[in-house]
């Protein structure tokens, strides 16, 4: 019976795949609507966030400044450890850097020297910002991301109960990226463009956030490392997102990001068939031969 229900569902979703421009509104209504329910939050409105500066240091003869502080979403009572690298010659564009390790992903092993890719972006005039997504970085005792979803205080563990009443950790991390995006696109200094880059396990979160941010981003660059929600087999997997497989997994979520200019590493033409067959994808989607900080950062400069 379950196999029959699954087959019927797949047939219905197959009919939704956009093959021309006229198909896109219904695809976005159904798949986009499902994503909004799964994540449980949209982009915070203008004025929803504040940045509480805790530290400020100038570097390289005052050519750029490092700001550390807390990014706050006051209405939700949420605070995210946050860093910004702001060049003196700011070009009015911002790059939001999402890393599975948190904001430490901006820096080399010493924790203070920006990666070469980040230094190049700052030297080119881009402001670069990052946060610790929930249960990464400053949220954990050792600074490392947790390896499984938090356990409930009940010996009868059942995902249907836990995730039926609480946001999955995956959704909470997407919330954090939406907060970061809102803080940038609605900032008082009014950046002309905001780009989103994600790697080291943060690509699925960034894809969901970009789809929910609609037209607020200028570009998206991700290294998916071939991730699929369908490969998850444990209820405490940190990336478990109930419903994601039913609604087409990562390729469908990437399709929701169109017409956003998107660069993707870790995939192929075959693995992204749903996305690449969508109307407009040929001119908006680039498959990168390799991922990593340098390759993803280079895509931002190519948008200039």
Image (tube, helix red, strand yellow):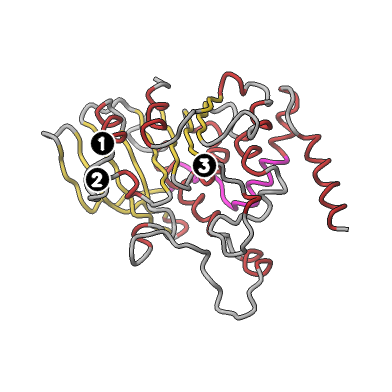
Q: Nearer the viewer, residue 94 or 192?
A: 94
- Label 3 belongs to which residue? 225
* Mark nearer the N terminus (3 vs 1): 1
| 233 relative to 133 in the view: left or right | right
Q: Residue at x 50, y 43 (%)?
A: 203
- Asked if marks 2 and 1 touch (Cβ < 8 Å), the reply is yes
Q: Nearer the viewer, residue 19 or 145?
A: 145
245 in relation to 89, above or below: below
Task: Report the Cα–Cα distance between label 2 and label 1.
Answer: 8 Å
Specify few, some or many for label 1: CA neighbours under 10 Å numbering under 14, 14-19, or 20 or more: many
List x then y, in percent, for residue 287.
53, 27
Q: Residue at x 30, y 25 (%)?
A: 91
Task: Report the Cα–Cα distance between label 3 and label 1.
Answer: 29 Å
Residue 31 lies in the magenta-colored region? yes
Placement of the N terminus among the 4 image quadrants: bottom right
Task: Report the Cα–Cα distance between label 2 and label 3.
Answer: 31 Å
**Displayed quadrant of residue 158:** bottom right
List x then y, in percent, for residue 256.
63, 35
| 144 relative to 209 in the view: left or right | left
The region drawn magenta spans: 30-48
- Label 1 belongs to which residue? 86
Q: Residue at x 50, y 29 (%)?
A: 263
235 in relation to 246, above or below: below
- Label 2 belongs to which residue? 67
- Asked if marks 3 and 1 touch (Cβ < 8 Å), the reply is no
């Amino acid at each position: 019976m379950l196999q029959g229900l699954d087959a019927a569902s797949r047939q219905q979703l197959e009919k939704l795949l956009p093959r021309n421009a006229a198909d896109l509104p219904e695809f976005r209504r159904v798949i986009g609507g499902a994503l909004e329910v799964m994540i449980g939050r949209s982009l915070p409105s203008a004025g929803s966030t504040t940045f509480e500066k805790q530290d400020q240091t100038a570097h390289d003869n005052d050519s750029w400044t490092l700001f550390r502080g807390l990014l706050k979403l006051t209405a939700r009572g949420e605070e995210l450890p946050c860093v910004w690298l702001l060049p003196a010659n700011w070009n009015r564009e911002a790059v939001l850097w999402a890393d599975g390790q948190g904001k430490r992903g901006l820096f080399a092993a010493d924790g203070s020297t920006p990666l070469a890719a980040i230094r190049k972006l700052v030297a080119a005039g881009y402001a670069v910002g990052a946060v610790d997504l929930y249960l990464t970085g400053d949220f954990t005792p050792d600074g490392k991301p947790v390896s499984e979803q938090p356990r409930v205080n009940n010996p009868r563990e059942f995902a249907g109960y836990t995730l039926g009443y609480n946001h999955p950790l995956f959704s909470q991390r997407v919330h954090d990226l939406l907060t970061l995006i809102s803080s940038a696109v609605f900032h008082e200094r009014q950046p002309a463009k905001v780009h989103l880059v994600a790697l080291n396990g943060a690509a699925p979160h960034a894809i969901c956030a970009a789809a929910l941010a609609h037209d607020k981003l200028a570009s998206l660059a991700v290294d998916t490392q071939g991730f699929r929600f369908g490969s998850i087999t444990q209820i405490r997997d940190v990336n478990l997102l109930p419903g994601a497989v039913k609604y087409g997994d990562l390729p469908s979520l990437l399709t929701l990001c169109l017409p956003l200019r998107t660069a993707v590493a870790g995939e192929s033409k075959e693995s992204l068939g749903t996305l690449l067959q969508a109307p407009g994808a040929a001119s908006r989607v680039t498959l990168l031969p390799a991922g990593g900080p340098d390759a993803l950062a280079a895509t931002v400069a190519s948008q200039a």
